[in-house]
Image (tube, rainbow, N blue to C red):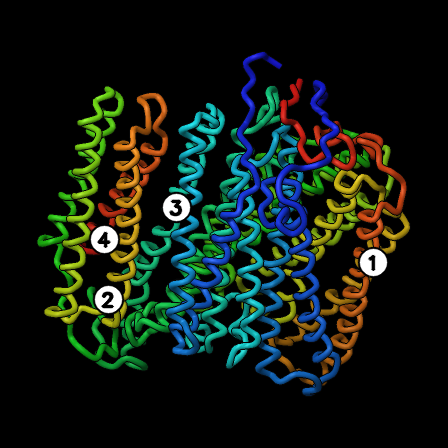
């Protein structure tokens, strides 16, 4: 072996995974009880959620300490890069499923419900058009237009991508002020996006009568924007953690993959939004 | 390939850290975690087996004897879910955990802590899944595919199943990312991609499939959950949705899933046959390319599960031809295995018996697959016992037989003790004979029109069903022989195994002592 061989870091036994498993057991069982109005569902669910948060703090905290104490070498860094890429790929496939659903519904399911055969036999009077709440829609609703809040949100997210890159430049130039400012701006823009999104939902429920129960349009609209919003929230929390770590003096210009991973994730969320904006809101 | 192993073999049989139960709960060692995966999957295999035997007991005679129809449907559903997600998949992950680092000369998996979590999520999912039998309304009875609208109508057992599927999905994605990163980033110096044992290649591609399709399954069951509880209309035509949509999403996951369950089996068989034919694997590169082609094609064939749902003829033709195309790379593989054996110095120790049995019986399942792929025939045999026969030929005689082949092949490496050849061979012969007694008659039942997932049947099906039930009980009992073989090894009853117990086994795993020390390849070997 060459003398420069670098031993791969293998962690000591850890108690965190079993806490994570216990947490998901509680969250799963608690959700089921809650949804079926039986047993102490919310209690079990929140015990699980609290355990999960404890586990995430402990586990990530340990990883951060190991990283900052220099126990990870180049090999572990490469592993982190590969794994984050593959993780984002799995997320892409998750959204791909819902985009596929929307495509199928708009191109195949709804037109076939409005076909001559279907209308004459089953769904009298149904006219296939998008948006629709289906042939047995109980209430009318207004669809969400693209050029109000959604367009502003698009600008916000695109800007946040730019501020994040600006922060990264700060990291590369060792300009910590620029780094902190860029990260802070990105997190704030993320929060602003979520604020607008929540306002949009309230507006939709309150004034447009657009609900999750508004047939297939409401289903796809809330499922897709909702999961996207969840991912924005997760991404913003990741970036917030990065901001705290920067303020604690973590990262150097050569060693800051955690920051890059969060940035990758943020850009992924950004790209999903662009597709969402076009196919859910606009077309 | 020959490996230069520096003095990397410590006599480090101990491990540091907690002992007793806490050792297993907190471990970050790939061998410990691999062992837990294997034990877990075998327990689930027996649980799913008990369900199968209850099904076969009910079907021994026409009429209703043992269980209620509702419970029968729960059993067929849970048998499928438990075997697919609890037995076959975790068993292969167990093999990956144990063998991948040893095969590529890595000290452990890339993310050892996450590896632990991937495993310990499975018992949680199993508790939710099996626990659903005991809630009001019982377990889900929608079939393992959980088709809407049935799955939208079931009781809370269905919700438990949904969350179990989510948790198993998280486990699979984390495990798969771990495997991909380990294979891509942790190979010993000189271990180029095209020198890797084929098992590593098949698992790399399997892991890619898992990362690609488990999120899609998560999406599918999430839509069921919101349709059930939050008033969405994804699978409800009255709201503009479509129950057939569920089938599309499910099978977009489901078809790659069947390759997830067979590609690692191909890898195991490709390790074993060269050893006992004492020849290098024929057509290594073509095996790699064939595996990759199967993976790519698996994404464009899903609707062959849905020929009877009503789709345009052009769509049927596309999916029919795409499906038949998969026979080409699969044929390449079978050809290569046979060509590896051609003029080899063959011996038939237990692993080789299982591997050759695998080729023989799996190929039959492959041919019935081709028959099912032909749309006009499929419309006849859809949802009949012909399909049941087909997928048990590829899943039991394919995946499971390869798992047993691999288990006997590497048991000496895991335990340091040779298994008993007599017991191993007895296990094989009982299994393959009873397997065929069980499932071969199902072809005839299916062609004669017996529907699947039905607790009672018309009188003309009685003889073949009785025969299949006898075979099933024989097959089930035969698996107890495996427990004897393994327990004897674990208790050290048998010949001590050398580092390489086989005459001509290639690969880095045979350069470390048997049993493999707790830590191996902390200094990577150099592969030439």
The reply to the same-chain question for discs 4 and 1 is: no
Mark 4: give few (<14), some (14-19) or many (20+) Cα within 10 Å: some
Q: Nearer the viewer, mark 2 or mark 4?
A: 2
Q: Chain of mark 1?
A: B
Q: Nearer the viewer, mark 1 or mark 2?
A: 1
Quarter of the image containing the C terminus of chain B?
A: top right
Q: Look at 64% across and 57% down and name the residue there.
A: B87
Spot occupied by residue A216 in the image (x, y as percentages of width and height): 27, 68
Q: Look at 58% across and 41% down and name the residue there.
A: B28
Q: Are marks 3 and 2 in contact (CB under 8 Å)?
A: no
Disc 3 from disc 2: Cα separation: 36 Å
Q: Which mark is residue A57?
A: 3
Q: Which mark is residue B481?
A: 1
Mark 1: give few (<14), some (14-19) or many (20+) Cα within 10 Å: some
First reached walking from the N terminus: tag 2 or tag 4: 2
First reached walking from the N terminus: tag 3 or tag 4: 3
Q: Are marks 1 and 2 in contact (CB under 8 Å)?
A: no
The answer to whether B14 is drawn above or below residue A132 in the figure is above
> The residue tagged with tag 3: helix, strand or loop?
helix
First reached walking from the N terminus: tag 3 or tag 2: 3
Q: Label 4, on which residue?
A: A279
Spot occupied by residue A96 in the image (x, y as percentages of width and height): 35, 51
Left or right for B500, reference A87: right
């Amino acid at each position: 072996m060459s003398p420069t061989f670098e031993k791969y870091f293998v962690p000591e036994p850890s108690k965190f995974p079993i806490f994570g498993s216990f947490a998901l057991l509680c969250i799963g069982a608690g959700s089921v009880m809650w949804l079926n109005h039986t047993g102490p569902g919310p209690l079990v669910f929140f015990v699980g959620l609290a355990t999960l948060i404890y586990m995430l703090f402990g586990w990530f905290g340990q990883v951060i300490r190991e990283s900052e104490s220099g126990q990870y070498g180049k090999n572990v860094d490469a592993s982190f890069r590969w794994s984050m890429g593959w993780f984002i790929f799995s997320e892409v496939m998750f959204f791909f499923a819902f985009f596929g659903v929307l495509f199928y519904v708009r191109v195949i399911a709804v037109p076939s419900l409005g076909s001559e055969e279907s209308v004459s036999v089953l769904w009298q009077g149904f006219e296939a058009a998008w948006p629709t709440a289906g042939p047995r829609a109980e209430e009318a609703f207004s669809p969400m237009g693209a050029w109000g809040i959604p367009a502003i949100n698009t600008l916000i997210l695109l800007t946040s991508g730019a501020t994040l890159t600006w922060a990264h430049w700060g990291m590369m130039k060792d300009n910590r002020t620029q780094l902190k400012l860029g990260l802070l701006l990105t997190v704030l823009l993320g929060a602003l996006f979520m604020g607008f999104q929540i306002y949009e939902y309230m507006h939709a429920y309150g004034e447009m009568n657009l609900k999750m129960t508004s047939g297939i349009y409401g289903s796809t609209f809330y499922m897709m924007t909702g999961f996207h919003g969840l991912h924005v929230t997760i991404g913003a929390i990741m970036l917030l953690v990065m901001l705290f770590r920067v303020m604690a003096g973590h990262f150097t210009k050569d060693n800051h993959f955690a920051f890059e991973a969060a940035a990758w994730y943020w850009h992924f969320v950004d790209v999903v939004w662009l597709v969402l904006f076009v196919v859910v809101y606009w077309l | 390939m020959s490996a230069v192993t520096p003095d990397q073999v410590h006599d480090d049989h101990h491990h540091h850290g907690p002992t007793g139960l806490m050792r297993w709960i907190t471990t970050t060692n790939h061998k410990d975690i691999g062992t837990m995966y294997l034990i877990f999957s075998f327990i689930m295999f027996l649980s799913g087996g008990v369900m199968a035997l209850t099904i076969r007991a009910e079907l021994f005679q026409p009429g209703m004897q043992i269980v209620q129809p509702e419970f029968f449907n729960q059993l067929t559903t849970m048998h499928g879910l438990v075997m697919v997600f609890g037995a076959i998949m975790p068993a292969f992950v167990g093999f990956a955990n144990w063998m991948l680092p040893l095969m590529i000369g890595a000290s452990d998996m890339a993310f050892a802590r996450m590896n632990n979590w991937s495993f310990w999520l499975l018992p949680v999912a199993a508790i939710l899944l099996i626990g659903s039998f005991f809630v009001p309304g019982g377990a889900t009875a929608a079939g393992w595919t959980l088709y809407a609208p049935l799955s939208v109508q079931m009781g809370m057992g269905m919700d438990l199943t949904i969350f179990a599927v989510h948790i198993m999905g998280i486990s699979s994605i984390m495990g798969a990312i771990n495997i991909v990163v380990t294979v891509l980033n942790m190979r010993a110096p000189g271990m180029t991609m095209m020198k890797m044992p084929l098992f590593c290649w098949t698992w790399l591609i399997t892991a890619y499939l898992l990362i690609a399709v488990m999120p899609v399954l998560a999406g599918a069951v999430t839509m069921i959950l919101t349709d059930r509880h939050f008033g969405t209309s994804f699978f409800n035509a009255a709201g503009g949705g479509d129950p057939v949509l569920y089938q599309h999403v499910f099978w977009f996951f489901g078809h790659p899933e069947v390759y997830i369950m067979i590609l690692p089996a191909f890898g195991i068989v490709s390790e074993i046959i060269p050893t006992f034919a004492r020849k290098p694997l024929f057509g290594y590169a073509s095996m790699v390319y064939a595996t990759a082609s199967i993976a790519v094609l698996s994404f464009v064939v899903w609707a062959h599960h849905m020929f009877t749902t009503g789709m345009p003829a052009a769509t049927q033709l596309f999916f029919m031809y795409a499906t038949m195309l998969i026979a080409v790379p699969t044929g390449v593989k079978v050809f290569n295995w046979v060509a590896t054996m051609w003029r080899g110095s063959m011996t038939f120790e237990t692993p080789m018996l299982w591997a050759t049995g695998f080729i023989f019986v799996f190929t039959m399942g492959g041919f019935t697959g081709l028959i099912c792929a032909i749309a006009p025939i499929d419309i006849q045999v859809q949802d009949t016992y012909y399909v049941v026969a087909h997928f048990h030929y590829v899943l039991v005689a394919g995946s499971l037989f390869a798992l047993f082949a691999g288990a006997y092949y590497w048991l000496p490496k895991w335990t340091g003790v040779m298994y008993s050849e007599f017991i191993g061979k007895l296990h094989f012969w009982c299994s393959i004979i009873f397997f065929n007694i069980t499932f071969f008659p199902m072809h005839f039942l299916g062609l004669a029109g017996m529907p699947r997932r039905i607790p009672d049947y018309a009188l003309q099906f009685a003889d073949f069903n009785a025969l299949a039930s006898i075979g099933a009980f024989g097959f089930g009992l035969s698996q107890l022989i495996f427990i004897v073989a393994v327990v004897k090894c674990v208790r050290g009853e048998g010949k001590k195994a050398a580092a390489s117990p086989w005459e001509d086994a290639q690969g880095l795993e045979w350069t470390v002592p048997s049993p493999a020390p707790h830590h191996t390849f902390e200094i990577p070997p150099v592969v030439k």
